[in-house]
Image (cartoon, rainbow, N blue to C red):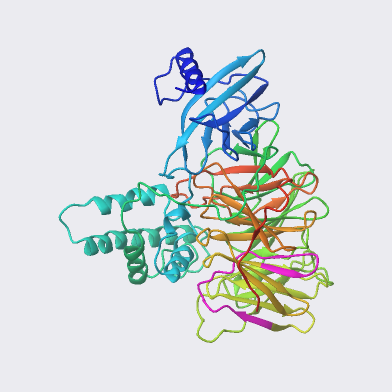
Amino acid sequence: MSRFCRQLCRWARLAAVSAGALTCLAVQAAPSVSGQIVDLNGNPLSQAMVTLEKGAGQPGPAAITVFSDDKGHFQFPVPGVQGARTPIVKLLGYKTVDTISKPSGEALDLTVIMHPDPNEAGVAPASAWLKDIADPNDRTLLVQTCVGCHQIPAPEVRAYANLIHDMPDVDPVEARENSWRAIVQYMNYISAWEFGRGGDAPPPNADNVYSGGPLASTTALLARTMLGSFREVSGYQYGAPVLANAHTVIREYDVPRPNAVREALTLDDPTVIWLADVSANRVIRVDTVTGATRSLEVPSARLMGPHTLVRDKEGGLWITPFFNGIVARLDPKTEHWKTWGLEVPKLGPVGVHDLSFDLNHDVLTDRAGRIWYSEIIHNGVGWFDPKSGKSQVYPIPPVPGRVGTELPYGLAMSSDRRHIWYSQLAIGCIGSFDIDSRKFDTLIELPDKNAGPRRITMSDGDILYVPLYGAGQLIEYDTRAHQMIGRYDLPDRASAPYSVTWDAKRKVVWVVTANANAIYRFDPRDKSFAVLPLPREGAFLRMVGIDKTTGALITTYGNIVEYVHGPRMAVMIDPGDAPAAGTGHTAAASAH
């Protein structure tokens, strides 16, 4: 037996733990918590996620996550999480064997021992189960159809698939089809309920963004892709260098349930996170120092369901609706609200989705002072004048062969404040609108209408970035030259990139994912990706903001539909900002 193993045995006896069990320790109020992650032979393990969850009634974040360095060392910030339990450690390909506490004065030093484990369930994201789907078109369609609402396969989906797999003495094909048909019917019922809450919303149907899709085709898709047992998964790789380092800190904040928090950002105060709750007419204020939350109600007699959040240069918070065309602005200093009920003759209430913004993601008006928006219900782009309250919508011309489910989604304005760029989620199209001429002047039809262009962003050079949600790719397009720079495969093609945000200080693009529990960083200078894994299963991300003072990334776990499982939290991330030089992952690019 090696000297290290003998030492491990002594520690284990002192800790009175049986072999293979976790030490049941409490961090209590130790002002300093640090330690090392090692394997059974004492070798350090780097870039492991180490999470401490706070005790009940303690202030601050609900959990803090740090990462081990190349020597396996980790250090929690001071003050850290008080009254916490045993740290939770996650590392692809490893499982925790033991955690040993060595108090030293007021500090607490931990040794976490891990051993290789090929079963990555609970560590690898939901997307890991999709890597072996034989037909990439099936993977694209599965993500595009199912992941708008929940991860696929989420833990509850895997449990259901296991029940089908375990059924004895039945026709496996018939059993799968019957079982998944019931689930698709249920998903469409939930979609009808979700979209029916607004009262004045159009009748829900299988074409809605949160539906389970047409019954027959979606049933067949699930039956041929959700195969075998889902209790184990192995061989998942991040596919890019891990961005996290010894300085990276992820802070997660609890939000009282019930809630359906969707998006988050900070305004002038970097210690306050604002959250949109689409289940009610409210935004939620989170104090990141104390962890305290407070709700502010949008004054509306009709349900509007705060959906998208955008700040303005005056420190105000703009909110677009899930329902009824009601846009709101909050002055966080006075807590005074102003609301607009947008209606267009012959259309009624409009479906406002995204607002026009600048390279810092502040609200941006055209030269006449009007704010532009993507109109998701009536397939158009529109404007409204905050002074008069007037609004107008311009229908997007139909695309032959792709008519009926267009869903205009992302929207961005060029720096000349003359051109609007938009994405159409359900038909794989990107286009532009000339404000001066009132004409649509660019149309980009992606080869696959299920590619899923979602929430877009514009750089300070008017370079447009578009995440392809279904295809798992990123588009880079020069809007001034009207030239495609490239289309890049994400490190995980099943990650479901939901939105992109241009970081004007770092000169990079942040790509958040709905299905991979991760954020990607794309560097336009060398076309490289890096990945920041997140510690919590079900980390469904819809948007990321950048604090203008600290540069921290602000997001949420946005499992918004009431019946969807998964965390619903505010998240603040300090990326660490010092990835090792020369470790970039060059994207697989194809210029057009």
Count of numbered tags: 0
Image spot of residue 388 (x, y percent): 78, 67
Q: Quadrant of the N terminus?
A: top left
Q: Quadrant of residue 354?
A: bottom right
Image spot of residue 269 (x, y percent): 78, 42
Question: In the displayed structure, would residue 349 be above or below residue 435?
Answer: above
For the residue pair 80 and 527, the one nearer the viewer reads as 527
**Which residue is depicted at the point 39% across and 59% down?**
187
Q: Is residue 17 left or right of residue 268?
A: left
Q: Is residue 475 left or right of residue 312?
A: left
**Which residue is depicted at the point 62% across and 72% down?**
423
Image spot of residue 202 (x, y percent): 50, 69
Magenta residue span: 442-465
Report the magenta stretch's main SS.
loop
For the residue pair 370 and 338, the one nearer the viewer reads as 370
Q: Quadrant of residue 68?
A: top right
Image spot of residue 485 (x, y percent): 70, 74
**Which residue is depicted at the point 60% across and 15% down?**
103
Q: Is residue 443 left or right of residue 280?
A: right
- The outermost residue toward the left is 169
Q: Is residue 56 at all visible to an observer of this figure?
A: no
As for residue 484 lying within the magenta part, the answer is: no
